[in-house]
Amino acid sequence: QAFVSMRPMPPLRQLLACRPCCSLSRSSSPHIIKTSLPVSPKLQSFSSSMLSASSHCDSLRGLRKSAVQAARLLHQRKHAPSSASGAIFPLVTSIPKPAAQHARYQRRLDLVSTKSSGLHTGAEQENQVLEQLKNVIDPDLNQDIVTLGFVQKLVIQDGVVSFDLVLTTPACPVKDKFKKDCTDLVMQLPWVKEVKLTLSSQHRPGGGNQRTETSQTGLKDVKRIIAVSSAKGGVGKSTVAVNLAFSIAKLGGKVGLFDADIYGPSLPTMVGVENPRVVRSQRNQDRIAPLEFEGVKLMSYGFTAKAREGHASIMRGPMVASTVHQLLAFTEWDELDYLVLDFPPGTGDIQLTICQQVNIDGAVIVTTPQKLSFVDVVRGIEMFDTLNVPIVALVENMSYFDCSCGKRHFPFGEGHSQRISDQYGTPSAVVLPIHSSLSASSDSGTPFAVREAVVDEATPKALREGFGTLASNVVQELSRIGAGGFEAPIVEFDEASKKIIVRPVQGDAVEWTCQQLREMCQAAKSPPPCTESTAPQAITPKGRYAVEVQWNDHHVSIFPYKVLKAGPEE
């Protein structure tokens, strides 16, 4: 007889279901199976081989097959010589553990097999994906997208990597590049079969950070508010405001456009809306329903019945402020990513009324190259500085025109917008040329940014790309400001060393002597000579990007932070 010894095993009825050729029966021990067959020395060797082979059995099916083959071989040895001693040789083989233990054992085998084949566990795969994505840097915030928390809902299953890329704004101008870079980097991992990336944007509380009760106004779902101002009429401010709004909409944002000019509304002429009537909102009878053109929501005093009938707007200051407030705050704007406000010229009641009702997230200044416009623009910048509104872009409109002879002409002079940008440290200066296609688009009721796809090749490239560049710069700068991506350095005067110390948030401190700093002054009035007693009397921030230095000789200088952080030229 031969005995098959087993460790804890499944019920014997499962093993008996193998139906071997020899008869098997239960013994008194639940772990012993007997078979009455003579055993030869060769069978002893065979049983040893079975013992070695059984250690490699991974599943119950393979073990059963081995047991059946062994029983059949034993049965076929009809002429095998009997053992002289008649000893019973134990044929030992290994049987899998019960089902639950076997499953755990199989998982351990799978883990070992995975490591040996170069694959990794879920946590290791996740870390590899995140390390790859750290190579994607946000150009505005100068940090990788993982550190900024843009990568969310990361799921890895069977080689398919899925995650959300949550950007600061749905109108992010580099979102397509982000998507391509993320996909390419993750696909470089050898075990990745597919990348599923979903673009979305961060939820930002609406209301435009209003100072009034948001639940009573239509601005409660507006996320960002942009003011377009010129402080001087006739510079093309409304043209810039309209095309900026439609250019941001092309980037993927939900946009609204508000014409705040009561005396001379231009929106009805520049945007040809069918049936331009101001009516009550169907959802809320206390609100005004905005008009819409190409997905952009519109509101202007020019759409009211009195204005459409051609009546002049004869109002005093308080009435104008009240009318602007009603049109702005009680229009049912719904959810908007950006609301563009087309300010009237000047720095009067309307501008102050709007800025008192809502916090403007950023202002775009529009100017023309001549010196007269430059002087008025400086006043506009001073107004927004007083109201703590950051300047996010500067536009020099009607800068030049290209003659058919190939020569470029500057009818209003050149260089003043760059001078403003250098003096106040504004982050973007966009130059737009003079061309008939721009004015033709405005007169036809279809904004140039909407007609851009059908504009002929004769249109200057600077004009075709100008509004798109402006929209991208504005969106990026607002995202940087909203995410705290800009922190002003500390500028102070050290009495002991007689030096101006600039301490940036990151990096080493920079030192300026009074002589060195005075030489960098770009004020309209040339500074008097700097003496040994010349020193700053007061240093105060000038807006978000510059600092004002009042000297003890009564001269006043303005220095952008980027100049101060760069340090004196060697």
Image (cartoon, helix red, strand yellow):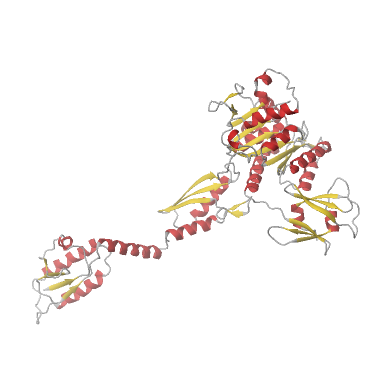
**Dividing the picture into quarters, in which one does residue 296 lie?**
top right
Residue 495 vs 416, above or below: the answer is below
Q: Nearer the viewer, residue 239 or 231?
A: 231
Residue 195 vs 67, above or below: the answer is above
Q: Is residue 10 left or right of residue 327?
A: left
**Dividing the picture into quarters, in which one does residue 11 lie?**
bottom left
Residue 21 vs 296, above or below: the answer is below
Position in image of residue 260 (x %, y %): 69, 30
Q: Is residue 227 left or right of residue 22?
A: right
Position in image of residue 474 (x %, y %): 66, 42
Q: Residue furthest bottom?
A: 85
Position in image of residue 148 (x %, y %): 57, 53
The answer to whether residue 38 of the structure is visible from this angle is yes
The image quadrant where one finds the N terminus is bottom left
The image quadrant where one finds the C terminus is bottom right
Q: Nearer the viewer, residue 98 or 458?
A: 98
The answer to whether residue 452 of the structure is visible from this angle is no
Q: Residue furthest top?
A: 309
